[in-house]
């Protein structure tokens, strides 16, 4: 099957499929959209595999793989969707609440992510050795770095509907906004060491992290403030929405040119516009149009992203021999997540009550498209297929199982928490 098409045709197919499947879900199934589209994409992957098994000459799987290769999930997400999704998510995060939880957020999105990476790597190295397909520790560390960041896309959509305390919601949102940028930096450092193309010392790694992460934050703050000043000087909702769009597209491209973290820049830029811009630089008409515009962008890209995550099963599960190791990675990542959040929460339990925050942060640490995109960027190696399959299985479990139950967990935790147990700004 020969499926040669340009970017417009590929995007058209994804949007049409997302719209059609979203309509079916809305009318008949009634699952949360991200879960439904991921399940439908995964079901399509299974159907393709079954058809290929029954009709070996049909080459349906080859056609779907060609289509997905032409989309290039990594480029589409990391260099395209992610900038829009992070900015849209950050617009709704309250900086005042973020400041209260700033230390837990900083620790969870840096040291917590590093601890999770190490735990996952050690566990995967041990498990792979037990099944007779030992993966070198360097590549296990790469997997730990790509699977540890929580996905802001999945987390933010759930938090918007929850009744959790505002400080807790801001902490979860803040961590998910920033730890993906940190995760991408850590992944890049560890991948360079694993492939042997660069000598990465601890000092060099810290230097790369500081430049990318803090440089991205500085760029986002600067561009966000420039956009804020421009919006405050005019009252034209069309132009102000255009300025926000320019901030995202131009800012992400500039971050790439400056070799700083684009995800961190967009998260900070979104915080500036979503707090100072919305409150002090916009009329009611502009505020309404801008927020609705970015809400629409967020929903459209969400639909396309989670459909693509499900469809990636066609590519990632071609080798049944790696499925067992991938399934074993699911409890491993859950254990690593729980361990990485427990310490900071015990230290800052006056800000975030441990009994309420720990279940939400541990079980609500959903993985998503960022992990898939990083896994697909892995260079050819004897362990690539195993790491790809493990990533897809962890992400699908996270989106479908954790995503379907975390909202119920939020409601249960909120109902058990008395008002005096909730943290205050003091």
Image (tube, rainbow, N blue to C red):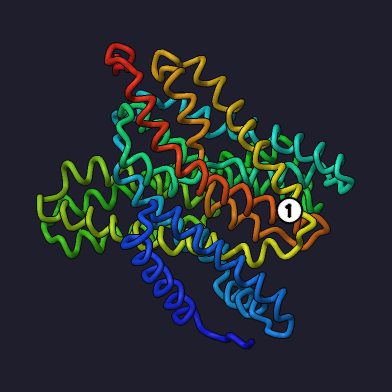
The x, y position of residue 84, in whole percent, is 39, 57
Pointer 1: residues within 10 angstroms few (<14), some, or many (20+)?
Answer: some
Disc 1: which residue: 323
Q: Is residue 255 left or right of residue 60?
A: left
Q: Residue 222 versus residue 96: which sits nearer the camera? A: 96
Residue displayed at 51% across by 34% down = 363
Q: In this view, does 285 lie to the left or right of 144?
A: left
Locate residue 123: give its quadrant: top right
Residue 420 visible in rendering = yes
Q: Residue furthest right?
A: 132
Q: Residue 302 versus residue 108: which sits nearer the camera? A: 302
Residue displayed at 49% across by 78% down = 10
Which part of the image, by quadrant, shows the N terminus?
bottom right
Residue displayed at 65% across by 43% down = 145
Which part of the image, by quadrant, shows the C terminus?
top left
The x, y position of residue 201, in whole percent, is 75, 39
Q: Residue 309 versus residue 142: which sits nearer the camera? A: 309
Residue 213 visible in rendering = no
Locate residue 129: give its quadrant: top right
Q: Residue 298 versus residue 79: which sits nearer the camera? A: 298
Residue displayed at 81% across by 52% down = 196
């Amino acid at each position: 099957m020969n499926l040669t098409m340009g970017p417009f045709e590929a995007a058209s197919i994804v949007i049409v499929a997302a719209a059609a499947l979203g309509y079916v879900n809305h009318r008949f199934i009634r699952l949360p959209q991200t879960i439904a589209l991921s399940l439908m994409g995964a079901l399509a992957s299974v159907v393709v595999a079954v058809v290929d098994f029954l009709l070996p000459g049909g080459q349906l799987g080859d056609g779907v793989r060609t289509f997905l290769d032409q989309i290039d999930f990594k480029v589409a997400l990391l260099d395209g969707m992610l900038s829009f999704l992070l900015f849209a998510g950050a617009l709704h995060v309250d900086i005042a609440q973020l400041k209260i939880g700033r230390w837990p957020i900083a620790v969870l999105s840096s040291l917590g992510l590093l601890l999770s990476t190490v735990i996952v790597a050690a566990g995967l190295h041990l498990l792979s050795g037990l099944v007779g397909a030992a993966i070198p520790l360097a590549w296990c560390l790469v997997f730990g770095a790509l699977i540890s960041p929580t996905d802001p896309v999945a987390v933010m959509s759930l938090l918007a509907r929850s009744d959790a305390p505002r400080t807790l919601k801001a902490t979860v949102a803040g961590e998910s906004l920033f730890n993906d940028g940190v995760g991408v930096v850590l992944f890049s450092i560890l991948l360079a060491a694993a492939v042997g193309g660069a000598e990465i010392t601890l000092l060099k790694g810290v230097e790369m992290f500081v430049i990318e992460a803090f440089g991205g934050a500085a760029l986002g703050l600067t561009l966000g403030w420039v956009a804020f000043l421009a919006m405050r000087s005019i009252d034209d909702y069309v132009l102000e929405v255009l300025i926000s769009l320019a901030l995202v597209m131009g800012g992400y491209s500039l971050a790439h040119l400056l070799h700083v973290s684009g995800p961190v820049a967009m998260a900070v830029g979104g915080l500036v516009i979503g707090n100072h811009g919305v409150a002090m630089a916009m009329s009611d008409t502009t505020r309404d149009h801008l927020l609705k515009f970015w809400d629409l962008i967020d929903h459209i890209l969400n639909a396309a992203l989670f459909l693509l995550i499900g469809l990636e099963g066609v590519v990632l599960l071609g080798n049944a021999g790696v499925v067992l190791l991938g399934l074993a990675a699911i409890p491993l990542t859950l254990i690593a997540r729980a361990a990485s959040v427990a310490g900071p929460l015990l230290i800052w339990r006056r800000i975030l009550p441990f009994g309420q925050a720990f279940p939400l942060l541990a079980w609500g640490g959903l993985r998503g498209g960022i992990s898939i995109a990083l896994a697909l960027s892995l260079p050819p190696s004897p362990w690539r297929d195993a790491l790809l399959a493990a990533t897809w299985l962890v992400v699908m479990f996270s989106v479908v199982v954790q995503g379907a139950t975390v909202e119920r967990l939020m409601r249960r935790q909120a109902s058990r928490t008395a008002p005096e147990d909730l943290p205050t700004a003091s």
